Image (tube, rainbow, N blue to C red):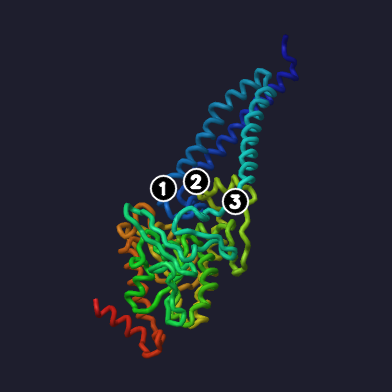
Amino acid sequence: MTMSTGGLRGTKVSAVLANFGLVALGVACLLVALAMDVHWSERHFLPVWTWTWETQLRIVLILRLLIGTVGLVLVFLLRPWLVQACLAGRALSALGSIARVVLAVLAALVATELILRTQTWRAAQEQFGLVDPLRIPDGEFGWSFAANRAATVMLDGRPVHYATGPFGYRAARVGAVPDFTRSTIVIAGESIVFGYGLDWPDTIPAQVQAKTGIQTANIGVNAQATDQVYMRLRRELPRFKRPVAVVIPFMPRLLDRNLDVDKPYLDAALRWHAAGPPPIRLVELTRRLLRYRDPADIARGEATTSAVLKGAIAAAEARGARAIVLVPQYLPEEPVERRIRHEVLDRAGIPYLLVPIPPQWRSPTHYHPTREGALRIAERISEDLSNNDKAILVDADHHMVTHMGSILMGEHSGG
């Protein structure tokens, strides 16, 4: 049986369309892979806590190779097969095979999404009732620490002792509470301030207190974003009758947390928003794995972080306290981290205390400052307070009046 002229023409047309269509798709994949260079990565990925930027670039490289491989498969494997099928008059059968594969993949994705929707969605940093120091839910800012709890955990091959007081502040012993009538340096923050991996005397707040002779309050909570830190500060600061300084940290590699909206969060106008699950959970899980961010979301997160830090400064100054934006600078600092620091702090005109932390001053396993790193941060905070002091401190018993600078200089002169 011979094929009619119309049928022959149809097979040739379908073969040409298949040829050019798959070539176009394959070339598009290759162009996308080529475009995903370092500059593209800096626009779409944020530095994260547990991975080096070099590791993230390796992940992007793997993605580039996968996308490029798909392009090559389309051009050199699938294209010849589909063209031959079209020339043999089996175009519909070949397209049907491709459609079945595509539908099977889509069905698997839909099924995975439906399964995920049967589970309670949690923010990336939620760890309620899993590990010590124990976190508990908080409707206003996501989570805080359980009150009046003691725990010992093994980190870096040694025991670390944690204790909290009645307000969930980290303390020297269970149940200890600051004297809210005394002059106090309130230190807000996340796990760096809390002192993850450090015993109480080695934490930043404890070392600041030892160096200045001024009571400190450690209100840090592990894994909180900058807006959560600020919300907790707004709640706790009114308890202190005479706050003389407020310390709030920022690190470029923690900006990624500030973009999450599946926890309670603030926008750039400092309006509160309730937590909510993402529209498509599988997409969010994939984004968490790859750490991809849209540039518009990054810009929004930078603007919000600037607004939050300004809000914290205003809250401190409204109480007559000096505000210190603390920036631990993990060395070597990557260009993407410098860019974020510039956008969030320098461009917004926010003064900050930059404290370089070399690799030997942070844990190789969980990346938090070691005792030496915390000591360096405490020294810089103490020096900054000494150099910029304008406050008069009254001791808790109201028996003497001492200038803060005198206290600090006396501490330094004593070695």
* Residue 173, horizontal then vertical, whole percent: 39, 68
Q: Name the residue under label 3.
A: 121
Amino acid found under the numbered disc labelled 1:
Thr
Q: Could you tell me if the residues under marks 3 and 2 are in contact, i.e. CB atoms within 8 Å?
A: no
* Residue 382, horizontal then vertical, whole percent: 35, 75
Quarter of image, res 352: bottom left
Amino acid found under the numbered disc labelled 2:
Met
Above or below for 58 versus 81: below
Kindly identify the residue that appears in the image at 34 percent across and 76 percent down.
Answer: 383
Q: How far apart are marks 1 and 2 (CA)?
A: 15 Å
Q: SS of the residue at dot 1?
A: helix
Q: SS of the residue at dot 2?
A: loop
Q: Name the residue under label 1.
A: 55
* Residue 270, horizontal then vertical, whole percent: 59, 69
Give the label on residue 36, or none.
Answer: 2
In the image, taking residue 86 as reference, residue 325 lies left or right, namely left
Q: In which quarter of the image is the C terminus?
A: bottom left
